[in-house]
Structure formats: structure tokens, C-alpha cells
């Protein structure tokens, strides 16, 4: 791939065509994808290459074009006793901690020969801070937010709702704000706090935000005013099941199933979260 400053319009078109076929970018508006083509670097790495280590301050964001990478975490911050907690495959993205300069919470190592798209911190922040969509080119919600939840995300939402009702039922309740009552809502900051407390695979508030964004994109969790970005703020969110006035409380059998599935659900969302977080960033008006 030609370096960004040396790219011709033909080079950008070739890169654009390739990236359109990658899962991580399939929902991006063409204008956003074009900007990525202008600033991204292509990396072809052999097996066993360490991109960064736990505790490092990040300088790049990545998307996986081919191959796979292991995510390793150590309780002592020593790479020698690091344990692989998950594997990132084609179409996944990672490294969003560069937005707030927080230390990397895991070590990333190529599991096999892998192809990556890399965006440097300064360019990534520009994508975040600068509106990329022209006023006359509307970004239609139908093209970005999935309205029909997938079965696995629907199940993930149910598991998290049951877990909250079982372990912290006070989080889902009617709330008043500016003389208006919002039924059966959760608060964004409380959801982030709760998720971090439930599992060792969530290492930062940024990561938790991405995981809740997965549910928001599929309509399994909704902002009361239909905002499309999950935020770690005092904002109200409602699970899909609580949209109905007669939403049932979980049975003992459902609580048991929830306990069995919760960690797998968290792992699934932790793998999907970086993609959702990146889409959220690039939709920012």
C-alpha cells in the first residue's frame, strides 16, 4: 500500500474497493471510508509479532483485514505469565484507547500471518473530532443502526437484563428528570460501572461503552430519546424487554441460565465492542 502522502486518486479508489468488502467497514458511510483510505497504513505481519504490550500508551488503531491475533492479559503486567483471553479475527478492530491516552489493557500478538489496517493516533482523533459528512449528504439511520436484532445480540441483551435484575435490581427503575417520568430505565454511568464489576475481560470504561454500543446498535438497548451513541453519562437507557409495561421478572430457571451464560456473553460483547465503538465514533455528527 502506497504511503498516505504519496497516494493518487487511483490508489485511494483501489483501497476503497478493498475496504468496502471488510466487515469492520461495511456499515460506514462512503465519505468516512474515503477518509480512512487517505490516512490508513497497510501492515502485513508474520506470526508471533507483538503489536503492543499491556501497560503501553497506544499510538495506533487497527482493523484486521486477514489472519487473527491473540489478546493476552497478565495479572502482574508481566508478559511471561500472560493468558490468552480471546482471539481477534477478520473484520474486528481494536486500539480505541488512543482517544484518551489510557494504557493498553492487554498485549496483542499475531496468531498467524495477518494483514492489518493501521491508523495513527493523530489521524484517528481527527476522524473523531471533525465532521466528515457534508450537510447535503445525510447519514440515514437505516444504513447504520440495525433495526432487527440478531438472535445472539437479542440473547445477550436478555442475559444482561436478567443479571442486573438478579444482582442489582435497583438499577432498572422508573426515574424522574425535569418533571418527566421515564419508565424502567438504567443510567449510562451505572451500566458501565456494573459491567466492569462483573467480569475480568472488561478492562476500561471505554471498552464497556463499546460493549453497550453493540446492544444499542441492534435495538436491544435504547436511549429514551433515541440517541444512537451510548454514553458514559447520566443518560437514560431501557432494555427492549422493558419497553412493554408488563415486562416479566426473570424466573429461577432463567436466573440459572443467566449465571451459566453471563461470562460467555461478556466475552462475545468484548470481541464485538471495538467495531461498534469505531462505528459510533465515525457516525459522530
Image (spheres, rainbow, N blue to C red):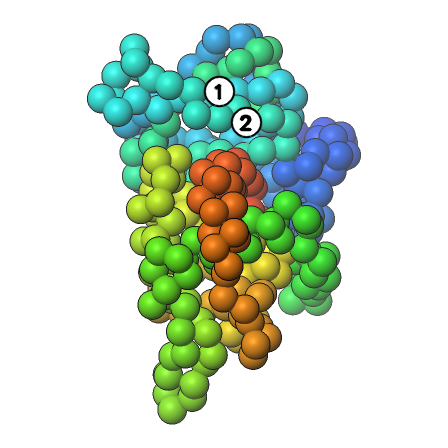
Residue found at the far left of this picture: 76
Q: Which residue is mark 2?
A: 88
Residue 108 visible in the snapshot: no
- Is label 2 in a helix, a strand or a loop? strand
Q: CA distance from mark 1 to mark 2?
A: 6 Å
270 left or right of 205?
Answer: right
Q: Which residue is mark 1?
A: 70
Residue 79 visible in the snapshot: yes
In the rendered view, tell whether residue 179 sits above or below residue 247. below
173 left or right of 7?
Answer: left
- Binning the other alpha carbons within 10 Å of mark 1 as few (below 14), some (14 to 19) or many (20 upward) gives many
Residue found at the far bottom of this picture: 179
In the rendered view, tell whether residue 258 sits above or below residue 61. below
Q: Where does the C terminus fall, quadrant-wise?
A: bottom right
Identify which residue, 195 or 159, lies in the foreground.
159
- Is label 1 in a helix, a strand or a loop? strand
Q: Residue at x 59, y 59 (%)?
A: 220
x, y percentage for residue 26? 71, 43
Q: Residue at x 44, y 44 (%)?
A: 259
x, y percentage for residue 139? 68, 61
Identify which residue, 215 or 23, lies in the foreground.
215
- Binning the other alpha carbons within 10 Å of mark 2 as few (below 14), some (14 to 19) or many (20 upward) gives many
29 left or right of 164?
Answer: right
x, y percentage for residue 237? 47, 67
x, y percentage for residue 105? 34, 32
Identify which residue, 215 or 108, lies in the foreground.
215
Earlier in the chain: of badge 1 and badge 2, it is 1
In the rendered view, tell whether residue 273 sits above or below residue 132. above
Are the residues at dot 1 and dot 2 in contact (C-beta closer than 8 Å)? Answer: yes
Q: Residue at x 68, y 49 (%)?
A: 151
**Across the whole image, how many numbered discs are drawn on residues?**
2
Q: Residue at x 54, y 27 (%)?
A: 88
Amino acid at each position: 500500500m502506497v504511503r498516505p502522502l504519496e497516494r493518487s486518486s487511483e490508489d485511494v479508489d483501489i483501497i476503497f474497493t478493498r475496504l468496502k468488502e471488510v466487515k469492520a467497514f461495511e456499515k460506514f458511510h462512503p465519505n468516512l471510508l474515503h477518509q480512512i483510505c487517505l490516512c490508513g497504513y497497510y501492515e502485513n505481519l508474520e506470526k508471533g509479532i507483538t503489536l503492543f504490550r499491556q501497560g503501553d500508551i497506544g499510538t495506533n488503531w487497527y482493523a484486521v483485514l486477514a489472519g487473527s491475533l491473540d489478546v493476552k492479559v497478565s495479572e502482574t503486567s508481566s508478559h511471561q505469565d500472560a493468558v490468552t483471553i480471546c482471539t481477534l479475527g477478520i473484520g474486528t478492530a481494536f486500539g480505541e484507547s488512543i482517544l484518551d491516552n489510557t494504557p493498553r489493557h492487554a498485549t496483542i500478538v499475531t496468531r498467524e500471518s495477518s494483514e492489518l489496517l493501521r491508523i495513527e493516533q493523530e489521524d484517528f482523533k481527527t476522524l473523531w473530532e471533525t465532521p466528515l459528512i457534508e450537510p447535503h449528504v445525510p447519514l440515514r439511520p437505516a444504513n447504520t443502526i440495525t433495526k432487527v436484532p440478531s438472535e445472539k445480540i437479542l440473547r445477550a441483551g436478555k442475559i444482561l437484563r436478567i443479571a442486573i435484575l438478579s444482582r442489582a435490581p435497583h438499577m432498572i427503575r422508573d426515574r424522574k428528570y425535569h418533571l418527566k417520568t421515564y419508565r424502567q430505565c438504567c443510567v449510562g454511568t451505572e451500566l458501565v460501572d456494573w459491567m466492569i464489576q462483573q467480569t475480568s475481560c472488561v478492562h476500561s470504561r471505554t471498552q464497556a461503552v463499546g460493549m453497550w454500543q453493540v446492544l444499542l446498535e441492534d435495538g436491544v438497548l435504547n436511549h429514551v430519546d433515541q440517541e444512537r451513541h451510548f454514553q458514559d453519562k447520566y443518560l437514560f437507557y431501557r432494555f427492549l424487554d422493558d419497553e412493554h409495561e408488563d415486562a416479566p421478572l426473570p424466573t429461577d430457571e432463567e436466573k440459572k441460565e443467566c449465571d451459566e451464560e453471563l461470562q460467555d456473553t461478556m466475552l462475545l460483547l468484548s470481541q464485538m465492542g471495538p467495531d461498534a465503538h469505531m462505528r459510533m465514533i465515525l457516525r459522530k455528527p
